[in-house]
Image (spheres, coloured by chain):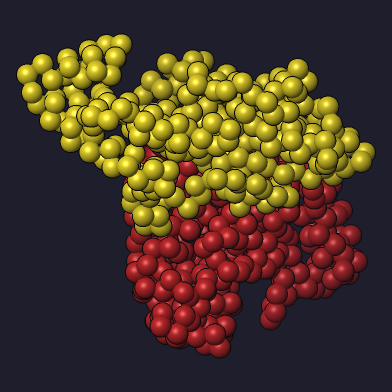
Chain colours: A yellow, B red
Amino acid sequence: MPRLGTQRRRTQHEPQTTSSTSDLGDLKTYYYTQTLDHFNYRPDSYTTFKQRYVINYRFWGGANASAPIFAYLGAEESLDDDLPIIGFLSDNAPRFQALQVYIEHRYYGKSVPFGSMNEALKNASTRGYFNSAQAIADYAAVLLHVKKKLSAQNSPIIVVGVLAAWFRLKYPHVVLGAVASSAPILYFDTIAPRHGYYSIVTKDFKEASKSCYKTIRKSWAEIDRLTSKPHGLSTLSKRFNTCNQLNESADLKDLLESIYTEAAQYNEPPTYPVSVICSAIDGASVGTDTLG
Amino acid sequence: MPRLGTQRRRTQHEPQTTSSTSDLGDLKTYYYTQTLDHFNYRPDSYTTFKQRYVINYRFWGGANASAPIFAYLGAEESLDDDLPIIGFLSDNAPRFQALQVYIEHRYYGKSVPFGSMNEALKNASTRGYFNSAQAIADYAAVLLHVKKKLSAQNSPIIVVGVLAAWFRLKYPHVVLGAVASSAPILYFDTIAPRHGYYSIVTKDFKEASKSCYKTIRKSWAEIDRLTSKPHGLSTLSKRFNTCNQLNESADLKDLLESIYTEAAQYNEPPTYPVSVICSAIDGASVGTDTLG
């Protein structure tokens, strides 16, 4: 599944300490009958699928008070993965007496058209409906539906998430405001530098530790050097304790790259994974070679 | 072809006297390779068709002066029909040193996908791409193309036409402003009164002449009464001098309705067709019956 940047690995999560976790018991799950294609009158465009959304009513001041609606526009993952870590809504809902609405992005989690992920990704035609323009049209439909269901026509909606800025631009009549924190809304060819994402990852490591950065930089050539030797890949497999035998150097490089990029992308408190990685690399005993 | 309201009949036009006609010689015609579906990654969405647009460079102050671009977003008819009557651009271009761009709406004139109008309207799937969301996406693509071609990145664009308001909402980064004169942008179920269009037509005739309004009102029942008589339709055919024999009363009613609605929709100087019709109706000699 296409992602901007790398996906945070769930297994490595620290136990959550934000208020969002404690609210999970208040969440109610719904399914909206969503239209497959919002911009087309072809008969197959009217195909529908079930889109999951979750509401936390706990702090809402209600429709009569025109209390606001905070809506999280699901990112490129299952809502099951989003819910435990999206603190913005639950952190701010009490103060604003806001309704919290979390909407799953189409083609993720339980919001998959064509009955199953296998069918949905089967070919270019079924995958063709998997795009951001359709996704934000989904969100508009769900939000208008929620407002109607709750008779909350006067409750202003604030959207949050990577698609929030685009949503606000395209559906200004649906939402009053948008918070697109850390959203790469201008990360496109001809606007951003071509290797902008990786430049920042490199910069993060360089700032954390110059020697760590240098070791990592040298390691790529070292992996290639070892790979070209007899039994080189076996040596690397043993050295990195891989579950399966490496087939090519790219297997190892891709793994390392994902570790570095994930660390930089989610270099947050309290763990600061970039520092953790660099401490390990820099802390190797004297005489250890580039690959540890 | 779906239209909002009635289509002005070209054959009844008075000779044009506005400046737009005199500029027709300055118009240059281009064709843009347009994408069939802007919101979908299905392989067939990448099908292209030629979209016609016309530019009048005569008054343009040029890219270096950041002189503005006035763009007419084609309505539901061929650009050949639009060009002689759209005075707004040519009337205002000299004062603002504006470039005039006229873009034909998809599925009209020479901007028809699938090779021919027959193919384009063949079935629900080919017709499915015929909608306003796709049309305004077309305009965005053409306008960005024109700006690029003329190196006119700093020239602000003002759009004009029935789709202008929607265009400004959905593509705020492409145009600085929109003039949607007389555009029924809120003419939808649940917003406008159900028979709003026809109420206004009725009001127009009532204001022009109360007796004219009454005669027209009576005429529908009179047509039904005559139709139910032996040889009634033949009598009506002769009375209204129809080219072909009427098959049902609706044939005549539809014709009359289109005459009345067109007159009201285009009740402009210098002809004021509503007054012309009412003068004829009211001016019938004494003793003439309802159907003249």
Q: Residue at x 41, y 33 (%)?
A: A279
Horizontal and vertical percent position of residue A209: 39, 43
Q: Residue at x 58, y 60 (%)?
A: B172
Is A166 rendered above or below residue A13? Answer: below
Left/right of residue A22 with respect to residue A171 in the rendered view: right
Q: Residue at x 60, y 46 (%)?
A: A180
Choose between A75 and A208: the one closer to the eye: A208
Q: Residue at x 36, y 55 (%)?
A: A193
Residue A270, quarter of picture: top right
In the rendered image, the quadrant that contains the N terminus of chain A is top left
Left/right of residue B245 with respect to residue B52 in the rendered view: right
Is A207 rendered above or below residue B23? Answer: above
Horizontal and vertical percent position of residue A223: 19, 29
Horizontal and vertical percent position of residue A245: 22, 12
Is A240 rendered above or below residue B237? Answer: above
- Given the current orientation, which residue lies at the most extreme front position? A286
